[in-house]
Amino acid sequence: MMAGRNFSNRKRSSSRTKIIFFTLLAISALILIGLGSAPPAKENDYLIKETDYPKKHIDWIVTYTAGGGYDTYSRAIAKILPKYLPNRVNVVIKNVAGAGGRRGSAVLYRSKPDGYTLGMLNPIGLMTSDIVKKSTEFDITQYTYIATCVRGVAGIFVRTDSEFNTIKDMQSAENVKFATSGRGSGTWLWGKLVKGIWGVRVHMVSGYLGTTEYITALLRKDVEAFTIGFTSPLIPYFKSGEIKPLLIFTRESWDLVPEAATLKGTPFGELEDFSSDRVIAGPPGLPDEIALLLERSLLNALNDPELQEWSKATNNPLYIRNAEETVVSIKKTLELVDKYKDYFKD
Amino acid sequence: MFEAFTDALGYLTDPITITYIVLGNITGLIFGVLPGLGGAAALAILLPLTYGMDPMVAMFFLAAIMGAVPFGGSISAILLNTPGTAVNAATCLDGHPMAQKGEAKKALEIAATASGLGALFGVFVLILVLPAVRSVILLFGPPEFFILFLFGLATVALASMGSFLKGLIAGGAGILFSLVGYSMVFGDLRFTLGSEHLWDGFSLIPVIVGIFAVSELINYALRGGTIAHGEASISGRSFEGVKEVFRQKKNLLRSSFIGTVIGIIPGIGGAAANFVAYIEAKRRSKHPETFGTGNPEGVVATESANNAKDGGALLPTLGLGIPGSVQMAVLLGALVLHGLTPGPLLVKDHLDIVLALVLGLVVSSLLASTFGLLTAHSLAKITRINVHYIVPVVLSFCFVGAYALRENIWDVLMALVFGFLGYGMIRFDYSKICFVIGFILGVYVERSFHQSLMMSYGSFRIFLERPITLFLLVLFLFVFIFPFVKKKIAVRNNNS
């Protein structure tokens, strides 16, 4: 049964719940009497003969705590992915949070390149935290990138009743208070860019933990604006008429909020590539055949109708890139970080 | 509204839903009893099981887990002096001395009754305030939080049992430990000794497990014997604890209110609620000197507060999509995985889901309480087992609990280190409660203070210009200065 199912189907889903419940009971009984055994391999288990992989479950590292955006996407994908893996092995979520995503990234980096450890990374987050303190535990260019599942769309956001309607309004203000987590975070990076590129006198109010706190800070009038690299959680607030985008950092209009101002026609279109993508990767040195198998399975899973439906129903858009495109995109972002590095100095 | 309510109630007559509520309840009790494993770990681990369920049934199941955890935690707090979860830490203070006196059954009954009633209170407030949640939540910004946190921190002065100076030292040490790690305000690392493990500072669970549980187990291992001293009877009169709770209506209501209000504050919620309620009960008690020696008032206060806080924490979680605690953050993730979008429109568009959570919480809390009342007598027998059998088992669970939430072996080491620190505090009579209050609130006081000043471009007037801050400041001064003035006047009158 799909998690992203429509609510009008409740009666049907109730009976399905019963079926699942009794199936679970039956399975438990089978295990208890010692009849549980591994399911037979399917005929369409391509590549299995060459690699004999995977034989056991795959660990999927989420570099943030349970309940956040990375965790939710990871769990949604991990639920579908076994369908497309040879032997239908399970994908087990492991939240290895800490140090702004760096701890989990380091654990993934150090893991054995045998295809049994994957993870969802936040490349731009790692790049910006490297600006504050270069990590010695991983090198972002060395991971084995498998796919991109989400493309972050960044922007500047204000209250709907704000005096600021355009970037020009902000430029003429004496000071504009922006909410941020703190130095080295994505919001801090974007705030610095807004200050450096458009000359807005950004006054950062730091100490807010993530998107929900930025939203509250804005609605509570602690601050007048904020920038984030991943806009989707704001969609309900656009719909409820509380928050509006002042500027979206994309080259073309954004399909989810088509009326919002963008970078179209400005010389800063390349800022779109500063995006907060969510990328699936393995440790450095993952054998090609395993990486290829994982890429194909993941791309299939990301295109699965059930996942697509969930994505639409919950405003969690999917943006799919293969391994090669992912690497190109990360390279571009790294070049941009280097190009604009002077803006990030204190 | 009515239709959604009857729809949600209808699920409560469905055998499948009832089965899942019972399963959730049992799971919650187990995760609550085991030190360190709390609601957040339970939800994160069991979330995949709900993928195939009808979202309504899934919500009943998850709420049932959340509803049972706090009472589960009080069982280990009372019997073993090792809080099952962070929100039960203060229950150890009087619950365990009751067990030592042979009153474990009564203490468990008090915890069961106060938990159930506290949960009902929290949910009642939740339903009452939910329509106006937006305006209530948005009234409190960093300056208001600063005064509230300061309030909490100042209670260290009231919480120190025995030496006042030692209480302040313990509180100060707690604050210092809370400042380790990356400071979001300053954007820099503090006191990390060059270790990447300390980037995020000390995690709350290992600290609580260490200070309260491991330290106590070290103490037991060295002491030997049984938990209940001497030949004191563990039977007690039937439902004596239930009657005790009803005798303390004021304490129950006040503590439930404190729990609900603190539960609303994102981040600190549950962990602080039980301490603040405990200290307030002590301050208002006719016999404050008996707190810490097995006064039932202490158990009523902490257990009603830590269940009421869930109703409070659900307010920002459901009303605005802002998680009130780690557990609530996982719940938000669960909502998304079930195709729902948390945020301002959730209550409007999916009231039935909201009600499923509310009803699940209530039913599960009451179930857990019933379980507690029915089993209190049997559970109390644990206090008659030689601690040399208990210590290795509970210690293993402590380390599993410290490890589970972040799956980090470092946290196990920290639980051990804080265990020795806690043992030192027991030996040299330093207040653990003061340490933990300092540890929980220290970093929040600092953050809200700096945020307030950043908001006002460095002007301290922000604390005087906002009506709620001003009101809280006056209240603060009144609460802390009035008793001294009253005492002075009394002394002067006596002299004259």
Image (cartoon, coloured by chain):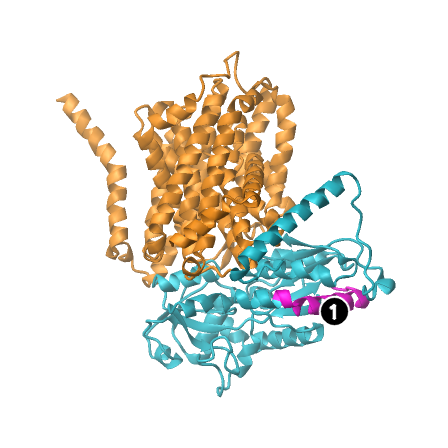
Would residue A47 appear left or right of A90 to someone viewing this image?
A: right
Q: Dot 1 lies on which element?
A: helix
x and y, in percent, of residue B481 in the image: 25, 37
Q: Is residue A233 placed above or below B142 in the rendered structure?
A: below
Q: At 64% across and 22% down in the image, what residue appears?
A: B388
Q: Is residue A324 placed above or below B333 in the rendered structure?
A: below
Can the viewer see residue B101 in this picture?
yes
Q: Is residue B263 placed above or below A137 in the rendered structure?
A: above
> Which tint was used for chain B?
orange
Which segment is the magenta one?
A284-307
Chain represented in cyan: A
Would residue B153 appear left or right of B223 to someone viewing this image?
A: left
x and y, in percent, of residue B477 in the image: 25, 42
The amino acid type of the residue labelled 1 equals Arg
x and y, in percent, of residue A139 in the image: 67, 65
Q: At 26% across and 38% down in the image, what residue appears?
A: B479
Question: Is residue B157 or residue B408 the one in the foreground?
Answer: B408
Extreme right residue here? A49
> Does the magenta run of residues contain A288?
yes
